[in-house]
Image (cartoon, rainbow, N blue to C red):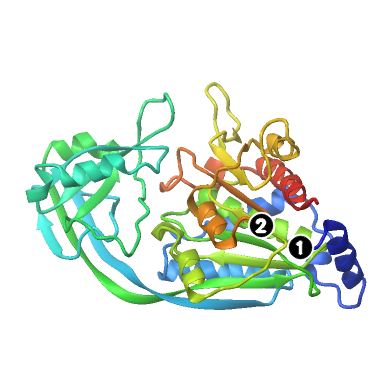
Amino acid sequence: MRLSRRATLAGAAALASGSGVRAWAQPRGQVGERLYKLVQGYSTWPHHRSATPEGRNTIAFVDAELKRLGAPTKKIPYIFERYEFFVEVKAKGRVLEALPLFYEAYNQVSSTTPIIRPVTLENNVDRKDIAGSISSPPNAKSPIVLLPTFSKFGSEEPKPALIGVDSDPARKGSGIPTVMISGEHLETLKAGGVNVEFRARRVSDRDETIIAELGAGGLAPLVITTPIGGWFTAAGERGTGIALALELAAHFAREMPIIFIATTGNELEFNGLKSLIKWGYKVEPYGVVHVGAAAGVGVKKPGERALSLATTRVAMSTKPAGPNTGMGAALKPGGFAGTERFSGEGAIWREFLGKDVPLLSFDGTFPLMRTPDDVPDLVTSPALLDIAYKSMLDATRTLLAA
């Protein structure tokens, strides 16, 4: 039986009144500025890919932030096949930034005659155009395929951007080396003088999931979880969510026990979470809050100079989340669209937890997601993070209310 909210809060308050006040129980100061500094800290590295040196630095960064809150941490390792690659694309002697489609091919290719086929990714995540471009002629006979990528949102015209594409290590690729490059270089590539060097292989490697405990007592915990990996700097895609999740954990640790789970390998189709479940992780939580992509992201509307919270963000809830509900009212100030349909990592959590556990999952996308331009000053601000946090705080309280 799940404890009532009143019993949980009363028990946690009694436990907090004892000696040895933890860091999470101390006054926290200005929320927005603090969250923005965390986003900047996370964005130190050019990418956060699984089992790379940068990925390990990311784990150390999140682990240090949890310990700063006074939370003991443990790391659950898992083994997977990492995609080790080298790719260099030159046009007219100039090196162009490029990224391969992971797990698509494992060989070595040097080519001056690549197939060049532009692709558009709806909302930066839809891969249908990519699949068709690799499998359809004449690509099947080409030594290598270059895909100049374009981002498209709603009725806006496609915009050129190098976009990372999530890939499952278990997927079976076409065997055709496939490389993404920003669509801004399309005409340069068409003009010729292109040279591509590519090599890739599978390497058995190890990554880790971080689990921390805050708060105190034997009461049913609130689980707060967030992914920490990303294709590039990922300030908005991942950094905002990490900062917001840590802040939520510090707040609710004053009221109840918290389990904080930071998963790696999100760019590999949620590989860290799937591996944690496969490992046999068990938890009987009071509720779960999953903070996914773009939680505190802003965009510039036409004619405006300042960022506004992106409307392409959702909150999936086991409680009714329509406009005329308590959950909907909590989500509205943060610009989240409420829904009771789960997708992505939220859907994995839903299946893992079952029907009886309250679950709230934040997710979204935005034009700079999975691109090299996802950097702090272009995608968020202290003010936006403060607004998003307050909305998520209210939504979490609504989720946990009896």
- Residue at 60% over, 66% down: 261
* Helix, strand or loop under label 1: loop
Residue at mark 2 = 356
- Residue at 26% over, 44% down: 130
Residue 127 or 92: which is nearer the viewer?
Answer: 127
Quadrant holding the N terminus: bottom right
Quarter-wise, where is residue 307 in the image?
top right
Q: Is residue 266 left or right of residue 17?
A: left
* Helix, strand or loop under label 2: loop
Residue 160: percent from left, percent from top: 33, 36
- Residue at 24% over, 63% down: 86
Q: Earlier in the sequence, mark 1 or mark 2?
A: 1
Q: Is residue 71 above or below residue 45?
A: below
Q: Is residue 351 above or below residue 142?
A: below
Quarter-wise, where is residue 149 in the image?
top left
Q: Is residue 111 above or below residue 326?
A: below
- Residue at 45% over, 57% down: 230
Residue 129: percent from left, percent from top: 27, 39
> Disc 1 to disc 2, how far (Cα)?
9 Å
Q: Is residue 356 above or below residue 117?
A: below
Q: Is residue 58 visible?
A: yes
Q: Is residue 46 visible?
A: no
For the residue marked with disc 1, what is the amino acid?
Arg
**How many discs mark residues in the rendered view?**
2
Residue 358: percent from left, percent from top: 68, 54
Q: Is residue 104 left or right of residue 341?
A: left
Residue 25: percent from left, percent from top: 83, 65
Please report contact status of discs 1 and 2: CB closer than 8 Å, yes or no: yes
Badge 1: few (under 14), some or many (20 or more) residues near its Cα, within 10 Å? some
* Residue farthest to the top, as pictured: 303
Residue 47 or 257: which is nearer the viewer?
Answer: 257
Q: Which mark is residue 2?
A: 1
